[in-house]
Image (cartoon, rainbow, N blue to C red):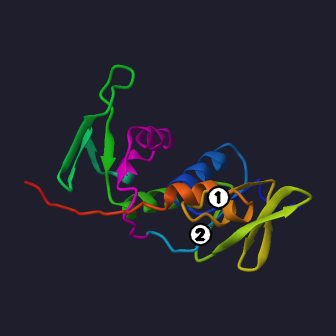
Amino acid sequence: AADCPSFCCGRAGPAGASLAIMLGRAGLSVEVYDARSFPREKPCGEGIMPAGVAVLARLGLLDAVGGTRVQGVRYHGWGLAAESRFPPVDGAPATMLAQRRLRLDAALVTAARATPGVRVFEDAAVEGAVVERGRAVGLRVGGDLRRAGLVVGADGLGSRVRGSLGLDARARASSAARVGLRAHFRLA
């Protein structure tokens, strides 16, 4: 159909929004669906590792995201400590960004909305992929089928897209013991 996008993506988090921006800039049409509204608070994603910083640079969004550049990480807890610097990239020190997820999501979703060919739908829960003749042909969103040439399930740990395609067994086993903690400190 003429209104059928090239790509249909479940969730507008960092992976989904970044992919939508890149695909839209390449001239493709993309629909991104997220069950929540943006920006939102979330405990994960506040330390954007060097590979993620490179993606933000490629997208031209480093200034919009902001944050503090950090050249390594140090973890302390439960009587243990671990510390490491990031390996250099092309001879230059690699850095991560420390930034609240609220700010990261806001910058990415704002850029996705501003990208020609990209439409972002908030408060639109993805129920799963729709399969016809052995092929994912779209997403079920709010009871409606949203057809697309390619379906992307960038919908995180509890992925309904992955689950609807029968790909959940391995993901469940590896995610059972995950816990997210965060704390913010003001330093001199």
Q: In this rendering, would 142 be left or right of 11?
A: right
Q: Give the secondary structure at mark 1.
A: helix
Q: Quadrant of the C terminus?
A: bottom left
Residue that sits furthest to the left in the current view: 188
Q: Which residue is mark 2?
A: 34
Whether the magenta-drawn stretch holds residue 61 is answered as yes
Q: Is residue 102 above or below residue 93?
A: below
Whether the magenta-drawn stretch holds residue 47 is answered as yes
Q: Quadrant of the N terminus?
A: bottom right
Front residue of this view, candidates 116 and 62: 62
Q: Give the mark count.
A: 2
Residue at the spot 33% in from the left edge and 60% down from the top edge = 100
Give the foreground label among 2 and 1.
Answer: 1
Residue at the spot 55% in from the left edge and 57% down from the top edge = 173
- How far across and how far down the image is residue 71, in percent? 26, 37
Res. 157 mark: none
Which of the 4 image quarters holds residue 32? Answer: bottom right
Mark 1 is surrounded, within 10 Å at the Cα level, by few (under 14), some (14 to 19) or many (20 or more) other residues, namely few
Which of the 4 image quarters holds residue 82? Answer: top left
Front residue of this view, candidates 139 and 80: 80
- How far across and how far down the image is residue 19, in percent? 60, 49
- Residue 176 at least partly seen: yes
User: Type of residue at label 1?
Assistant: Ala
Q: In this rendering, would 118 be left or right of 183?
A: right
In primary-sequence order, the first of circles 2 and 1 is 2
Q: Is residue 146 above or below residue 56?
A: below
Q: Give the secondary structure at mark 2.
A: loop
Tell me which segment is drawn in magenta: 40-64
Residue at the spot 20% in from the left edge and 48% down from the top edge = 80
Q: Which residue is mark 1?
A: 169
User: Type of residue at label 2?
Assistant: Asp
